Amino acid sequence: MSQGPRSGLAAVSSALLAMSRHLEVRDVLKTIVVSSRELLDARYAALGVPDDHGGFAQFVVDGISEEQWRAIGPLPRQHGVLAAMLHQAKAERIADVRKDPRFEGWPAAHPEMSDFLGLPIRDGDEVIGALFLANKRCPKPEGSCGFTEEDEELLSILAQHAAIALTNARLYERSRELTIAEERSRLAHELHDAVSQKLFSLRLTAQAAAALVDRDPVRAKGELQQVAALAAEAADELRAAVVELRPAALDEDGLVATLRTQIQVLDRAHSARVTFTARGPRALPAAQEEAMLRVAQEALHNALRHARAEHVDVTLDRHGRGAVLRITDDGTGFDPRAVRRAGRHLGLVSMRDRASGVGGRLTVESAPGKGTVIEMEVPGG
């Protein structure tokens, strides 16, 4: 390594702290790859998480543009040197991977690689990933310096900590999946209790109207008006449940696109005008994006179902390395202090918990007859 002892130690410390900072698997994988490439001064780095079918469930790269990565094509299979790393669970340091007898070539758009350093990421006896670097930079004009034994030792330290970070991230995601399952179960019970009861009342009221239509048309008309009101309430309950159960698609679309889609649905489904504006927000860690989406959903639910708002405006703005989400409505408003004293928090406790859980903060401004502004700010990753 060209770095001095102090600068080298600081770089290692920085890389290890970066790995432990994230809890989402995709964020951890990206951080491991970026940290490894920067620390060992390589042109390219990648990390593959194997599946059970001879391929990779996830494959993260650094040093290659998105356009070039798309041109390369589908994820690689477990073959050649990558397969050896996974199946033999040992390090591979090669002066020129193109001359290795196990080399099987690469797609036309793939960058030309020569010197290679790779290590398996292990959790006990299980190989959970393959981390590799290629084309170590060299201050000399003639090209690559090649990876050294010191580089291999350093990458080995990173791989050990990467295993811990990746295992923790997986445990976190499994825990979150259980929480989501519990939340869906709660929603199912609420849906049954609220909508089923309304539909039962709807049927009884319709039967009463049918019995009265000939002998007492005035009373029958009143019953039919009640039918209409019950049907509207049941429709509102269903809309709320559908929006909350709809998959967020954050992994594929990101927060901006997901919010825009859901708000367009709400705008069509309700008589109120619901608008959305995004002003250059950064991509955020997955946990923060999910928390922001859930806070937006809760605030929209309150504005449309409880506050009887005629206009709800949602904005997402860039704020330093993070972002600010703001939901403003012109509804009935409320006294936040009185709501807390009465024990009816309209989801405010849940929203505050979601914000604080990802290092953010939530503020609420409201007064009777003055509408409500809910703002969530997160610092970013």
Image (cartoon, grey):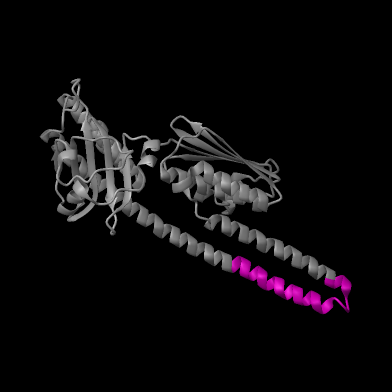
What percent of the width, then of the height, locates residue 318?
50, 32
Asked if residue 299 can be seen in this view, the reply is no
Q: What secondary structure characterizes most of the magenta part? A: helix
Q: Is 378 part of what is drawn in magenta?
A: no
Name the side, left or right, on which 147 lies relative to 181: left
Question: Is any atom of residue 127 visible in this view?
Answer: yes
User: Seen from this angle, which residue lies furthest left?
Assistant: 149
Residue at image x 36%, y 40%?
A: 69
Q: Is residue 7 above or below residue 46?
A: above
Q: Is residue 3 above or below residue 12?
A: above
* Displayed quadrant of residue 6: top left
Q: Position of residue 180 (x, y in %)?
A: 44, 58
* Label total for image: 0
Quarter of the figure that contains the C terminus: top left
Q: Position of residue 192 (x, y in %)?
A: 57, 68
Which residue range is magenta in the image? 193-220
Identify the residue shown where x is 44% and y is 61%. 181
Nearer to the camera, 150 or 104: 104
**Which residue shows up at 45% across the image and 39% down it?**
360
Instruction: Report the quarter where the N terminus lies.
Output: top left
Residue nearest the viewer, comparing 79 with 192? 79
The structure residue drawn at horizontal position 46% and vertical position 29%, both measured from the top left corner, is: 320
Residue 298 on image: x %, y %? 56, 50
Residue 213 lies in the magenta-colored region: yes
Q: Is residue 203 left or right of residue 36?
A: right
* 118 and 376: which is toward the camera: 118
Horizontal side of residue 241 vs 272, given as left or right: left
Q: Is residue 380 left or right of residue 13?
A: right
User: Please, is residue 212 above or below residue 341 in the view?
Assistant: below
